[in-house]
Image (cartoon, rainbow, N blue to C red):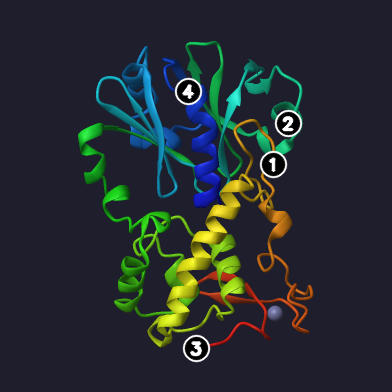
Amino acid sequence: MPELPEVETIVRELRPKLVGLRFRDAWADWPKTVRQAGGLEHLRKEIKSRKILTVRRRAKYIVIDIEGKKTLMIHQKISGHLLYGKWKLIEGKWVSTVAGPLRDDPENRFIRVVFSLSNGYQLSLADQRRFGKVILADDDKVGELKEIRELGPEPLELSLKEFAALFRKKKGKLKQVLMDPAFIVGIGNIYSDEILWRTGLHPLSRVENLSDIDIRDLYKVTKEVLEAAIKRHGSSMDDYRRPTGKLGSFQEVQRAYHRTGQKCAKRDGGIIERLKVGGRSAHFCPVHQMLK
Ligand SMILES: [Zn+2]
């Protein structure tokens, strides 16, 4: 599932392309995706000819502010990613008309939603598993939406003091806490594994047992990992792709996620193991990651 670095990459790469353009129309192959937008017909009517003012991110939502005081939010969920290019509907399937990864990478072929733009390009949601969703709201009501209201703070915007205060109020298993969007947003399976591997904390460590030094390390490493991943345009170990259809490259420097059975890169003799935490997999080194 795309996490903060992947969504941030998409937003940064789409912003210069989309701002100033107008929506022409929208298409969807799956009614559930636009259910939150009042249905496809309502969405088409509301966005038609409206100019795109900003493209930004809140947690894992791609937020597009448009003229008429409307906000379009797209959550890519498990397998979705937004692409920018040119497609043609051929026998019910959208096919990229331009050679390259949009046409040739199978991960980019599951086009579920297409927004046509005033410059002749399209913004498309590729989403193999169909959990992605589109929400349309009045921009002054966005903060009241259930999906937004219940979100915790942005990890890259917290000071050490705020971060520490947050952790001091919390109890639970560290991996699970890091992945709880009501506590802190944008961190999922990949980045919680990588953050914990780098801090040397075991995923089952109890938050209430962390020392001040542990929390300071966790703060520093969380920022480092998320920023490094943004620099590498996210991780394409799974189905995530950039808006051009190309891969991110953070998977090349991942040290824990999906490395079960491989030697720990710290060369401490550890072999990466996998265990279940709250229904999700945690990958960790049993030698250098300490249980607190
Ligand atoms: Zn190790």
- Residue at 73% of width from left, 68% of height from top? 259
> Looking at the image, is 239 positioned above or below residue 220?
above
Q: Is residue 106 above or below residue 290?
A: above
Q: Are the residues tagged 4 and 3 within 8 Å (C-beta)? A: no
Instruction: Give the percent coordinates (x, y) of residue 116.
Output: 50, 17
Which residue has dot 2 on it?
Answer: 101
Residue at coordinates 44% horizontally, 16% vertically from top-left? 21
Between 146 and 120, which is closer to the camera in this rendering? 120
Q: Amino acid at mark 3?
A: Lys
Mark 4–mark 3 Cα distance, whole angstroms, equals 47 Å
Say which element carries label 3.
loop
Cα distance between the residues tagged 1 and 2: 9 Å
Question: What secondary structure is found at the residue carrying circle 1?
Answer: loop
Q: Give whichever of discs 2 and 3 has the lower sequence position.
A: 2
Q: Which residue is mark 3?
A: 292
Please tell me which of labels 2 and 4 falls first in the chain.
Answer: 4
Disc nearest the viewer among 2 and 4: 4
Earlier in the chain: of badge 1 and badge 4, it is: 4
Q: Amino acid at mark 1?
A: Leu
Q: Earlier in the sequence, mark 1 or mark 2?
A: 2
State yes or no: discs 1 and 2 in contact (Cβ < 8 Å): yes
**Pointer 4 residue:** 18
Percent of width and height locating residue 229: 59, 52
Q: CA distance from mark 3 to mark 1?
A: 36 Å
Residue 16: x and y in percent read: 50, 25
Secondary element at image label 4: helix
Q: Which residue is mark 1?
A: 247
Of marks 4 and 3, which one's residue comes earlier in the chain? 4
Front position among marks 1 and 2: 1
Crowding at label 1, few (<14), some or many (≥20) Cα neighbours within 10 Å?
A: many
